[in-house]
Image (tube, rainbow, N blue to C red):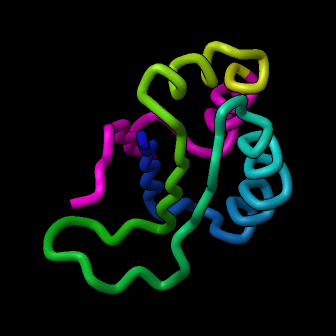
């Protein structure tokens, strides 16, 4: 299993962010080929040891890192990536892609 963790900083206009993210971006992302599950954090996020508290954290689940690459090379992936730039600048988001395994 591979995961894509997307961490968003607090936006200037949280209400506008929420509207766009939930009404437009999430439905686009759910069209990604190979996506198994999409989760978002509930607010507030309270247990941060250092640094800025994230506004929202999204976790997307795929079979592999290659599947993530293929998903974002697709038309749905390109649309999703372009849309993200309309509501969150590159320096307002951190993306972590990694293989995960149960222990």
Residue lying at the far left of the rendered structure? 50
x and y percentages locating residue 20 in the rendered image: 78, 54
x and y percentages locating residue 70 in the rendered image: 59, 17
- Where on the picture, by quarter, is residue 15? bottom right
- Image quarter of the N terminus: top left
Residue 39 highlighted magenta (yes or no): no
How many numbered discs sit on the rendered protein?
0
Residue 93 highlighted magenta (yes or no): yes
x and y percentages locating residue 64 in the rendered image: 45, 31
Residue lying at the far front of the rendered structure? 103
- Image quarter of the C terminus: bottom left
- Where on the picture, by quarter, is residue 91? top left
Q: Is residue 12 left or right of residue 17?
A: left
Q: Is residue 21 left or right of residue 81?
A: right
Query: Of 73 and 82, which appears nearest the observer?
Result: 73
Please, is residue 74 above or below residue 100 in the view?
A: above
Q: Is residue 98 left or right of residue 63?
A: left
Q: Please give the name of the residue rendered at 53% of the width and 39% of the height, measured from the top-left corner.
A: 62
Q: Please give the name of the residue rendered at 29% of the width and 50% of the height, measured from the top-left corner.
A: 101
Q: Please give the name of the residue rendered at 63% of the width and 54% of the height, measured from the top-left corner.
A: 37
Instruction: Please provide the residue range marked out in magenta.
Output: 79-103
x and y percentages locating residue 40 in the rendered image: 57, 66
Q: Is residue 58 left or right of residue 47?
A: right
Please, is residue 61 above or below residue 32 in the view?
A: below
Q: Please give the name of the residue rendered at 42% of the width and 40% of the height, measured from the top-left corner.
A: 2
Query: Of 6 and 68, which appears nearest the observer?
Result: 68
Please, is residue 75 above or below residue 103 in the view?
A: above
Please, is residue 83 above or below residue 22 in the view?
A: above
């Amino acid at each position: 299993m591979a995961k894509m963790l997307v961490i968003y900083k607090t936006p200037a206009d949280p209400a506008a962010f929420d509207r766009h993210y939930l009404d437009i971006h999430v439905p686009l992302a759910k069209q990604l080929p190979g996506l198994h599950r999409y989760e978002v954090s509930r607010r507030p996020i309270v247990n941060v040891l250092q640094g800025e508290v994230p506004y929202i954290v999204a976790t997307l689940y795929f079979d592999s890192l290659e599947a993530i690459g293929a998903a974002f090379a697709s038309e749905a992936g390109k649309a999703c990536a372009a849309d993200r730039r309309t509501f969150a600048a590159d320096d307002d988001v951190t993306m972590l892609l990694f293989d995960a395994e149960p222990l």
